[in-house]
């Protein structure tokens, strides 16, 4: 199963293996707290796309399209291995729901590739 949440949300046992999916971490408290098991920068998109998105030069749909091109297949394959090993993986990023965040698109990408990884409706 794959899930997502903000890295600022409390750590819960149901999170399983926690993967920080950020290219850059500007808030040093994220690194200091280290409330994640693995940091996968390759899941965060390119710096160019991120900067244009943050600056409002591209919309979220365009950013997501660029993210789909930028995330290597091997990164999704690594997530799959982690899911098989740990049962649940939770992708983490700094945004709080319902703000736009690339982790939503990452989950969609992952489920498109591995449909059996979708969380139960009650999760």
Image (spheres, rainbow, N blue to C red):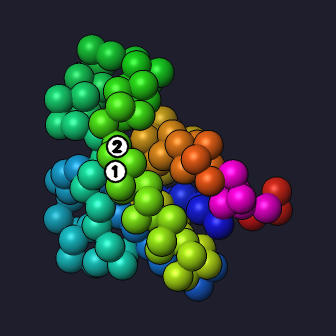
| Residue 80 spot, x, y in % from top left | 51, 65
| Residue 89 spot, x, y in % from top left | 53, 70
Residue at 34% x, 50% y is 43
Give the residue at mark 2.
Answer: 71
Give the residue at mark 1.
Answer: 43
| Residue 60 spot, x, y in % from top left | 43, 24
Q: Callout 2: helix, strand or loop?
A: loop
Q: Callout 1: helix, strand or loop?
A: helix
Residue at 21% x, 71% y is 31
Residue at 69% x, 51% y is 115
Q: State whether residue 89 is above or below residue 77.
A: below
| Residue 52 spot, x, y in % from top left | 23, 23
Which numbered circle lies on residue 74? none
Question: Would residue 43 be visible to someone looking at this image?
Answer: yes
User: Which numbered disc, 1 or 2, marks the residue closer to the eye?
Assistant: 2
Q: From the viewer's perspective, tell me whether residue 31 is left or right of residue 97.
A: left
Of the pair 86 and 98, the residue shown nearer to us? 86
Is residue 49 inside the magenta stretch? no
Q: Earlier in the sequence, mark 1 or mark 2?
A: 1
Q: Which residues are magenta?
A: 115-120
């Amino acid at each position: 199963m794959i899930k997502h949440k903000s890295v600022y949300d409390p750590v819960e046992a149901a999170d399983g293996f926690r993967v920080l999916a950020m290219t850059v971490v500007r808030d040093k408290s994220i690194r200091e707290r280290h409330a994640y098991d693995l940091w996968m920068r390759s899941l965060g998109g390119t710096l160019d796309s991120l900067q244009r998105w943050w600056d409002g030069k591209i919309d979220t749909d365009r950013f997501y399209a660029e993210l789909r091109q930028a995330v290597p297949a091997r990164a999704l394959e690594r997530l799959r291995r982690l899911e098989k090993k740990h049962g649940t993986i939770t992708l983490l990023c700094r945004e709080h729901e319902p703000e736009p965040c690339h982790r939503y698109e990452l989950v969609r990408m992952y489920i498109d590739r591995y449909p059996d990884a979708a969380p139960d409706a009650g999760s």
